[in-house]
């Protein structure tokens, strides 16, 4: 038993476990910002009165929501980088990192769009009619009347999307990001197969610790900021 605990403790001196989790947190942060922007634009396209924009928004959501994330991330590496030679930095690791952020954001923007659109559905029709009655066109009405209320109604689904994004950041290895948790876990298990269960539990518990506060926080915010009807 002493050998087990001493071997488990040595893992923290041999491998940067906390650093790997920090990489996943940073991937999640940047991808969340980018997907929130892109998802908001897509949501506006889907509720736009212009049919072609509605079609384009619907097509994007349908395609990316039904495409496996690993395929999107592999596409960024094999096609954008290897075939087309599009490099985002002179440093390969930095290029792979931002390609992973791009792939995660493009994929989760479809889910952010649907979360915001569900929030739009909570806004009474009379609000939009009142905005039009005072002379506001679509974009000013969306910016000043519809989206502020839609975001308040979409906090819970947006929180679920953020949790999914954090967990899916472990797939960044498909874009050749070698410093995040799943890559490190595989390396640790290869060199210490006798500690396989303990290593797995270490990373599982780590993600539980990261995810629970997000769930509790978004639930609290959704209740506190809910629009009273």
Image (cartoon, rainbow, N blue to C red):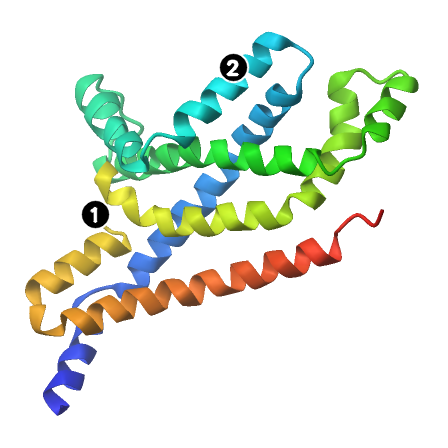
In the rendered view, would you say 103 is above or below 161? Answer: above
Nearest the camera: 41 or 89? 41
Using the image, tell me which numbered label, if any, was put on residue 56.
Answer: 2
State left or right for residue 214 relative to residue 4.
right
- The answer to whether the residues at label 1 and label 2 have Cβ atoms under 8 Å apart is no
State left or right for residue 57 relative to residue 203.
right
Q: How many numbered marks appear?
A: 2
| Place of residue 118 in the rendered image (x, y in percent of width and height, measured from the top left) | 63, 37
**Mark 2, other Cα within 10 Å: few <14 / some 14–19 / many ≥20:** some
Q: Residue furthest bottom?
A: 2
Nearest the camera: 6 or 46? 46
Q: Residue at x 26, y 22 (%)?
A: 80
Dot placed on the residue nearer the N-terminal end, 1 or 2: 2
Circle 1: element type:
loop
In the rendered view, would you say 75 is above or below 119? Answer: above
> Which residue is the site of mark 1?
178
Find residue 108 and report its image quarter: top left
Q: Residue at x 30, y 30 (%)?
A: 72
| Place of residue 40 in the rendered image (x, y in percent of width and height, measured from the top left) | 59, 30
Q: Residue at x 34, y 30 (%)?
A: 67
Find residue 198 and report its image quarter: bottom left
Using the image, tell me which numbered label, if any, was put on residue 95.
Answer: none
Q: How far, Cα to Cα, is label 1 from label 2?
A: 35 Å
The quadrant of the picture occupied by the N terminus is bottom left
Q: Residue at x 25, y 37 (%)?
A: 175
Circle 2: element type:
helix
| Place of residue 98 in the rendered image (x, y in percent of width and height, measured from the top left) | 34, 35
**Mark 1, other Cα within 10 Å: few <14 / some 14–19 / many ≥20:** some
| Place of residue 53 in the rendered image (x, y in percent of width and height, measured from the top left) | 58, 13
């Amino acid at each position: 038993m002493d050998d087990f605990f001493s071997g488990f403790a040595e893992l923290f001196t041999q491998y940067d476990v906390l650093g790997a989790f920090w990489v996943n947190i940073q991937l999640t942060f940047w991808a969340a910002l980018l997907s929130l922007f892109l998802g908001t634009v897509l949501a506006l396209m889907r509720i736009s009165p212009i049919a072609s924009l509605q079609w384009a928004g619907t097509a994007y959501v349908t395609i990316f929501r039904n495409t496996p994330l690993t395929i999107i991330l592999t596409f960024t590496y094999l096609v954008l980088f290897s075939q087309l030679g599009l490099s985002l930095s002179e440093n390969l690791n930095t290029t792979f990192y931002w390609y992973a952020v791009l792939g995660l954001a493009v994929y989760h923007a479809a889910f952010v769009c649907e979360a915001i659109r569900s929030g739009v559905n909570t806004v009474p029709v009379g609000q939009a009619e009142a905005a039009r009655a005072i002379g506001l066109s679509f974009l000013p009405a969306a910016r000043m009347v519809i989206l502020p209320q839609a975001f308040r109604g979409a906090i819970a689904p947006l929180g679920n999307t953020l949790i999914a994004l954090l967990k899916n950041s472990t797939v960044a290895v498909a874009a050749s990001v070698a410093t995040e948790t799943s890559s490190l876990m595989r390396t640790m298990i290869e060199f210490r197969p006798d500690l396989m269960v303990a290593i797995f539990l270490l990373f599982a518990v780590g993600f539980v610790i990261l995810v629970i506060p997000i769930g509790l926080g978004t639930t609290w915010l959704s209740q506190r900021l809910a629009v009273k009807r």
